[in-house]
Amino acid sequence: MAEFFASGRVADLVLAVLLAEAALLFAWHRRSGRGLRPTALAGLVLPGVAFALALRAALTGAGWGFVAAALVAALAAHLFDLAIRLRR
């Protein structure tokens, strides 16, 4: 189990689950017209993707610059999500 975390594969699993969730929610919206619009879905998923990338970078010993960039991307995605939600 320690190798699973140290190798960064745990972050890969998180990314796979996030992308599968996004794909299913997008398909549901396209098929039924219900659920989240694509922009709202992006605002929901992108911060998690950026955090998972930061986690993977930190676990695998990537440079601090990449970890910091992924965290800044998570902040930007979060602010995008807030802007979408506050416009309603």
Image (spheres, rainbow, N blue to C red):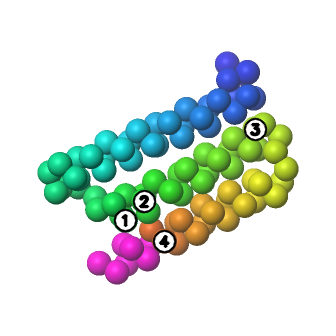
* N-terminal label among 4 and 2: 2
- The residue where tag 1 is placed is 39
| Nearest to viewer (mark 2 / mark 3) | 2
Above-or-below relation of 85 to 52:
below
Above-or-below relation of 81 to 63:
below
Give the extent of the magenta segment: 82-88
* N-terminal label among 2 and 3: 2
* N-terminal label among 3 and 4: 3
Quarter of the image for the N terminus: give it: top right
Q: SS for tag 4? A: helix
The image quarter containing residue 9 is: top right
Q: SS for tag 1? A: helix
* N-terminal label among 4 and 1: 1
**Main SS class of the magenta portion in the image:** helix
| Nearest to viewer (mark 4 / mark 1) | 1
| Nearest to viewer (mark 1 / mark 3) | 1
What amino acid does circle 4 point to?
Phe
What amino acid does circle 1 point to?
Thr
Q: CA distance from mark 4 to mark 1?
A: 9 Å
- CB under 8 Å between callouts 2 and 3? no
What amino acid does circle 2 point to?
Ala
Q: SS for tag 2? A: helix
The residue positioned farthest toward the bottom in the image shown: 87
- Image location (x, y in percent) of residue 43: 44, 63
- The residue where tag 2 is placed is 42
Picture disc at residue 64:
none
Q: CA distance from mark 1 to mark 3?
A: 30 Å
What amino acid does circle 3 point to?
Leu
- CB under 8 Å between callouts 4 and 1? no
- CB under 8 Å between callouts 4 and 2? yes
Picture disc at residue 59:
3
Q: CA distance from mark 2 to mark 3?
A: 25 Å
